[in-house]
Image (spheres, rainbow, N blue to C red):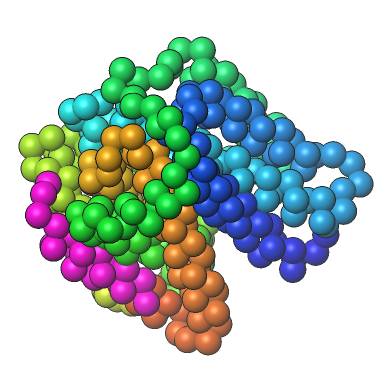
Amino acid sequence: MGQEIVGYLISSVQLGFISGTLLFSLFMVADRFSPSRVFAICAILAAFCNLILISDDLSASQVLAARFGTGFFLAGIYPVGMKIAADYYEQGLGKALGWLVGALVLGTALPYFISGTSWGRSYTLVVKTTSFLSFSGGLLLYAFVPNGPFRKLSNRLRLGAGTSLFKLPEFRKAAFSYFGHMWELYAFWAFTPFAIDTYNSLSGNTFSLPLVTGIIIALGAFSCVFGGIISQHWGSKTVVSIALLVSGCFCLVSPFLFHLPYFLFLLGWGLWGMAVVADSPQCSNLVASAAPIELRGTALTLVNCLGFAISIVSIELLSFLMYKINSTLLFLPLSMGPLFGLWQISRRKYQ
């Protein structure tokens, strides 16, 4: 298969995740069924969809279907994982979500680290490793993490639950600040290799694209944990506001970073990598706290669905602009997300 299918492979995972979260939120899956069981089943099915990639003589349509399936079942892992955390923490959910999202960020960085080593030369080894981790993770969670003590079961299906959530002012503000965050986050991650390549071209350096990208993404795990800890004292709203302000400033000054000495460029991009994701768990905490307890799973899944759809738009925008404008200006449009998020979070009354 040629290079032209790479974009379709990425989009198929994204479309799968959006489709999955949309259906899961519509049918209130995380609120009507055991979240631990949903997580385990989806982790196992995602692993099998991933393993299909190492089969012999796959057609392009079969590969795309497998990637779509992986994305679809991821909808039962990330937002449902946050629902499990919410069922365990009546207080201190911001700190718990800081650890959970931090683990997600490390998982995002892992393929880049693998690509930067000799393991990256064997795609079958990468597929087998990630599939094994997904399969075993689902089994371990189901075996050792039962439903939380603060879980409130929804006994009936309410197809209009998502619409009713957005009628709640505090929920709407928290969700909109998350959408501003998502406009920036995945586009920043997706185009960080392009930024490093641009810096290499301008400066004559030879930084490893996958290795440096993996480090920058992984740094966000520490900021998620740290943000969760300080949210216990300052409140989630403050953490979200600071993170959005810092990352928004980096968006605006990004053209100048490409002309700095290499250590300042790496420092700046690393700090941006920390700020760009530090608000994610605290936005989710604000979303969960603003939703009725029996609809928390639906709320988190729906907001994930819409946020990820927004991230596709920003990624496609940068993909369109990357060869039409000066490379150093590419990240400027991302500033719209943090600015919008700051506006929305500033209108929220509660921490």
Q: Look at the image and tell me whether residue 278 can be seen.
A: no
* Residue 41 locus on image (x, y percent): 60, 27
Residue 344 sits inside the magenta stretch: yes
* Residue 278 locus on image (x, y percent): 28, 48
Q: Nearer the viewer, residue 249 or 280?
A: 280
Q: Quadrant of residue 116?
A: top right
> Which range of residues does the magenta coloring cover?
333-351
Q: Nearer the viewer, residue 197 or 64?
A: 64
Q: Nearer the viewer, residue 42 or 269?
A: 42
Give the residue drawn at x 27%, y 75%: 252
Quick one: quadrant of the N terminus? bottom right
Query: Vertical placement of 268 versus 27: above or below?
Result: below
Residue 343 sits inside the magenta stretch: yes
Q: Quadrant of residue 52?
A: top right
Badge count: 0
Query: Vertical placement of 141 versus 322: above or below?
Result: above
Query: Vertical placement of 165 versus 51: above or below?
Result: below
Q: Nearer the viewer, residue 224 or 159?
A: 159
- Residue at far right of view: 57
* Residue 172 locus on image (x, y percent): 27, 58
- Is 233 left, or right, of 95 in this rendering? left
- Is 304 left, or right, of 46 in this rendering? left
